[in-house]
């Protein structure tokens, strides 16, 4: 897997995603050439992994690879991967059976050899009939994709003033989205029999891992996350393979029973006077105890794997891992200081109809007491997931980091100036709009990024009908000017020193030089002053 250097991550996503895709194509082509070597047992596995990484890259960065990955080629890659599924599954099952040989008694070894021979025959039938043809197919796809990915068209927009996102910014957003999906799917696994849910979670873990792997060189702490995802992937993979082997073992036992019945039927109607014809049972009957012993070992293996999953990837383990991924994603998503743009805000009369029925995130914010350092706790609730953050502002710097639920719950009672709002997001014409509907305050605000602070911002029709006034200070005219209505001065909460001076001026002395006891407003929100 290609590791990207630091300077490459700051380039445009259209360029870097193509560099990454081209390297993955070369890996897939190299693995395909090894398929014909019978002395290379890992060739099929490496080929499948290379195809998965390539398809995952196409899926994640599809908006930035537009025009370079035809639908027909993506479908052909999917079919190539599917053509090797059965053979790879049987290889894994044969490896598990070989490992159980020492655990079975001597009388049960015959069942193991019978099942292994049966699976080996199925594996030969499951392999693609013409491996050379598969290699040629990969070579043809390689030529098509190499030609398309080495160049792309760029349309310059001279009126756009917003900064362009880098590959690192885009990947940070993708990491956060894939983490949300993985968390929901991991929490949905309830038992060792939840094969479909465990398999879906395993696919999500792979996709998250494939997003992080190219970053390991530029961001060293990404490698530790990749290693943990690899362990999770192997754990869920072993559980999935065990569930598949349960079905294979059941099919084999049914086939053995049918074979026994057929042979007994032949013996019952066989025209012979030999009394010994029924003395010896069919040879397949001797396999039943061994197959049952294998079933017992397989069930123990499934239970062990599920206990390991529960101990490492339930609430606490998952929350700790998710917090580390969130911190990495936040670092990647934050723009560089010279690229920060001023938000453009608009106060709305009502919530736009376009977003009313759409998905939203419930956000709760509360500020901790402090003067020089402004610290805010944030809880975001979206369908299937809850995130907790700590936002710290010191001067011009703002830092946002993920925290655990336990830390949030312990600090939340200390917060003041709490806000609850429902956030909607809309992408219109390449510009991302964020609409916050403040609950209990009858206030709705729309916001978008604007690098230059220009007033020449085209407001979309769905938003213009709800517009009350523009909210960013940069767009307000000076009060008192001709044609500019006088605006009320925004209320500002006084600092601790201002509040103390005000109290000394307004509270009379009790005659002894001491003032009457007063309430200290320095640790309370502005609206509590009454």
Image (cartoon, grey):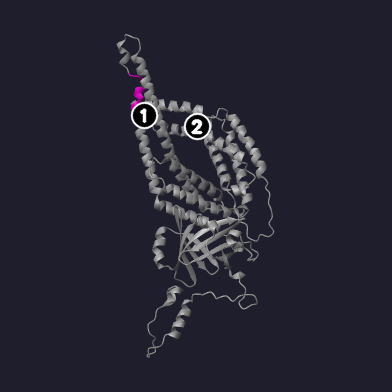
Q: Is residue 59 above or below residue 76?
A: below
Q: Is residue 189 above or below residue 453?
A: above
Crowding at label 2, few (<14), some or many (≥20) Cα neighbours within 10 Å?
many
Whether residue 69 appears in this view of the structure is yes
Kindly give the residue lying farthest to the top in the view shown. Answer: 273
Q: Earlier in the sequence, mark 1 or mark 2?
A: 2
Q: Which mark is residue 291?
A: 1
Q: Which mark is residue 87?
A: 2
Residue for point 64% across, 61% down: 458
Q: Which residues are magenta?
A: 281-291
| Rendered location of residue 105, percent (x, y) | 33, 29
Residue nearest the observer in this picture, 214 or 481: 481
288 falls in the magenta region: yes
Q: Quadrant of the C terminus?
A: bottom left
Lateral position of residue 488 relative to residue 380, left or right: right
Residue located 50% across and 54% down the image? 359
Instruction: Please say if 336 is above or below 473.
Output: above
* Image quadrant assignment for residue 523: bottom left
Which element type, helix, strand or loop, lies under badge 1? helix
Magenta stretch, overall SS: helix
Report if the CB atoms under discs 1 and 2 are less than 8 Å apart.
no
């Amino acid at each position: 897997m290609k590791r990207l250097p630091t300077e490459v991550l700051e380039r445009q996503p259209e360029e870097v995603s193509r560099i990454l895709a081209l390297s993955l194509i070369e890996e897939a082509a190299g693995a395909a050439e090894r398929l014909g070597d019978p002395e290379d047992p890992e060739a099929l596995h490496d080929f499948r992994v290379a195809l998965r990484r390539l398809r995952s890259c196409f899926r994640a960065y599809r908006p930035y690879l537009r025009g370079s990955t035809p639908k027909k080629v993506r479908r052909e890659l999917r079919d190539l991967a599917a053509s090797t599924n059965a053979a790879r599954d049987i290889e894994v099952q044969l490896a598990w059976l070989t490992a159980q040989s020492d655990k079975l008694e001597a009388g049960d070894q015959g069942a193991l050899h019978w099942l292994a021979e049966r699976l080996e025959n199925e594996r030969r039938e499951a392999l693609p009939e013409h491996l050379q043809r598969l290699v040629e197919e990969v070579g043809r796809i390689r030529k098509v994709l190499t030609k398309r990915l080495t160049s792309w068209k760029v349309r310059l927009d001279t009126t756009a003033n917003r900064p362009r996102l880098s590959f690192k910014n885009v990947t940070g957003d993708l990491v956060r989205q894939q983490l949300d999906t993985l968390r929901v799917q991991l929490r949905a696994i309830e038992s060792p029999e939840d094969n479909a849910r465990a398999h879906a979670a395993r696919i999500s873990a792979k996709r998250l891992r494939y997003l992080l792997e190219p970053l390991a060189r530029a961001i060293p702490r990404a490698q530790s996350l990749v290693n943990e995802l690899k362990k999770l992937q192997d754990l869920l993979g072993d559980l999935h393979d065990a569930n598949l082997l349960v079905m294979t073992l059941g099919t084999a036992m049914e086939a053995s029973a049918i074979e026994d019945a057929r042979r007994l039927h032949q013996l019952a109607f066989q025209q012979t006077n030999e009394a010994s014809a029924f003395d010896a049972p069919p040879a397949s009957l001797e396999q039943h105890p061994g197959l049952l012993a294998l079933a017992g070992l397989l069930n123990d293996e499934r239970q062990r794997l599920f206990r390991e999953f529960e101990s490492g990837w339930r609430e606490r383990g998952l929350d700790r891992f998710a917090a580390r991924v969130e911190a990495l994603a936040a670092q990647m998503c934050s723009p560089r200081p010279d690229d920060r743009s001023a938000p453009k805000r608009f106060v709305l009369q009502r919530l736009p109809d376009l977003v009313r029925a759409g998905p939203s995130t419930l956000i709760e914010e509360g500020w901790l007491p402090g003067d020089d350092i402004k610290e805010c706790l944030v809880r975001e609730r979206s369908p299937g997931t809850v995130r907790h953050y700590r936002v710290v502002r010191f001067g011009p710097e703002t830092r946002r980091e993920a925290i655990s639920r336990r830390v949030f719950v312990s600090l939340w009672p200390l917060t003041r100036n709490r806000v609850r709002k429902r956030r909607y997001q809309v992408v219109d014409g390449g510009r991302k709009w964020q609409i916050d509907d403040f609950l209990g305050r009858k206030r709705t605000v729309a916001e978008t990024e604007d690098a230059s602070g220009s007033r020449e911002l085209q407001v979309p029709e769905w938003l213009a009908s709800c517009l009350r006034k523009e909210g960013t200070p940069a767009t307000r005219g000076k009060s008192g000017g001709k044609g500019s209505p006088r605006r009320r001065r925004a209320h500002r909460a006084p600092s601790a020193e201002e509040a103390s001076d005000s109290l000394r001026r307004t509270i009379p002395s009790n005659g002894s030089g001491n003032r009457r006891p007063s309430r200290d407003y320095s640790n309370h929100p502005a609206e509590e002053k009454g």
